[in-house]
Amino acid sequence: MKTYLVGGAVRDELLGLPVKDRDWVVTGATPDDMLKAGYKPVGLDFPVFLHPKTKEEYALARTERKSGHGYAGFVFHTSPDITVEEDLLRRDLTINAIAKDENDNLVDPYHGQKDLTNRILRHVSPAFREDPLRILRVARFAARFAEQGFTVAEETRQLMQKMVQEGEASWLVAERVWQETIRALESTAPVIYFQELESCGALNVVMPELAVSFNEQALSLATQKNCDVTVRFACSLCSTDSTSLKSVKALCKRMKVPSQYREVAEVTARILPQWFKGDITPELRLKLLQQTDGFRRPERFQQILTACHIFSEVSGGNRKLSTQLTADLEKCKAVDVQALIAQGLKGKELAEGIQQARLEAIQ
């Protein structure tokens, strides 16, 4: 029984980057051997165990063969006879197919260290084409490691194109597409993720709305300003076009985008055409405060304002409006609602009174 540190932990260690998660592969062992050693089973599709002390994941070395469509269409085989080299062969990229044994010796049968040195993202074997999720993963790695100078090998990009042409990308489920996309948006160069998907034809399959309206400039500026992921998502998807909202809603519904991202993107798309109007009257400013729900949700209000301001910088809109609306909101909050109630206003009359008082405060 031998234990190897594998995958991202070895890669990041060799790159001098912080190691966050450690994954391990065990050779020469059976599930019973693992149980006897005190490991706790957690795997459903194949034998994965938690270390009794560190709680890190230890998987038995395995091989796999294609049995159906999509990223889940595989049959796994584990055996004490399977070597670490055979296990590494099933991995996606050479830089992720390096192992380190208990004596810190590296096992690198597919020249991952060479590709690390040359900053190349290259597939390990033709088996890469059997898992469409790897198209997204390569694009995400290209975004994540762009700062270190990594690019996708041409033969790998061609293989990704062929997978799309053969229809493999259409088997990707929305939840997995979203998981990879949100992780890419967290990177230092998320634009590259979408560019790589576009170059191989996958963007039109998994996110057709973005294939039409992807806003590279806005996303680049949001990344440069270190905006949070919610703002980055809105900037990548929205536009100043009046039809943008329909596309945003369609993508968010199909990809089952979580509400905190969906709401900011939808409101941004809804108000952007108004943002670019020439005459921003006090009435329109109050309307924008209400549409952004600034009175009840200040954090979301600021996210929407940030996204809209980025579009102003990119497309020549009103760059002062976000500052103006922030000041307007504070003026509106200062309206004495209790004084209006003391005047005997209630119901519809009270609502109208508050509205008028807020408008006067803005004016």
Image (cartoon, helix red, strand yellow):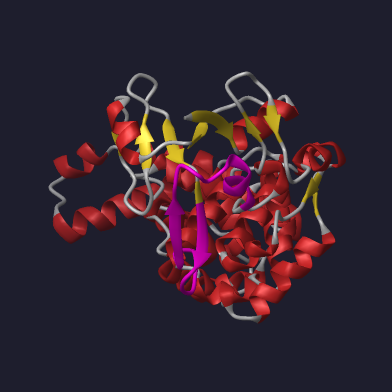
Q: Where is residue 313 drawn, in percent x and y?
A: 73, 52
Q: Quadrant of residue 139?
A: bottom right
Left or right: 160 with respect to 52?
right
Q: Give the number of callouts.
A: 0
Q: Is residue 333 magenta?
A: no
Pick the residue in front: 22 or 169: 22
Look at the picture and state if 99 lies above or below 293: above
Pick the residue in front: 6 or 204: 6
Pick the residue in front: 155 or 84: 84
Query: Residue at position x 57%, y 21% from top?
Result: 102
Left or right: 20 with respect to 330?
right
Left or right: 297 with respect to 174?
left
Q: Is residue 80 magenta?
A: yes
Magenta residues span: 63-89
Q: Where is residue 118 drawn, in percent x and y?
A: 87, 41
Query: Residue at position x 30%, y 38% from top?
Result: 41
Query: Residue at position x 62%, y 18% from top?
Result: 103
Query: Residue at position x 67%, y 48% from top?
Result: 141
Pick the residue in front: 304 or 171: 171
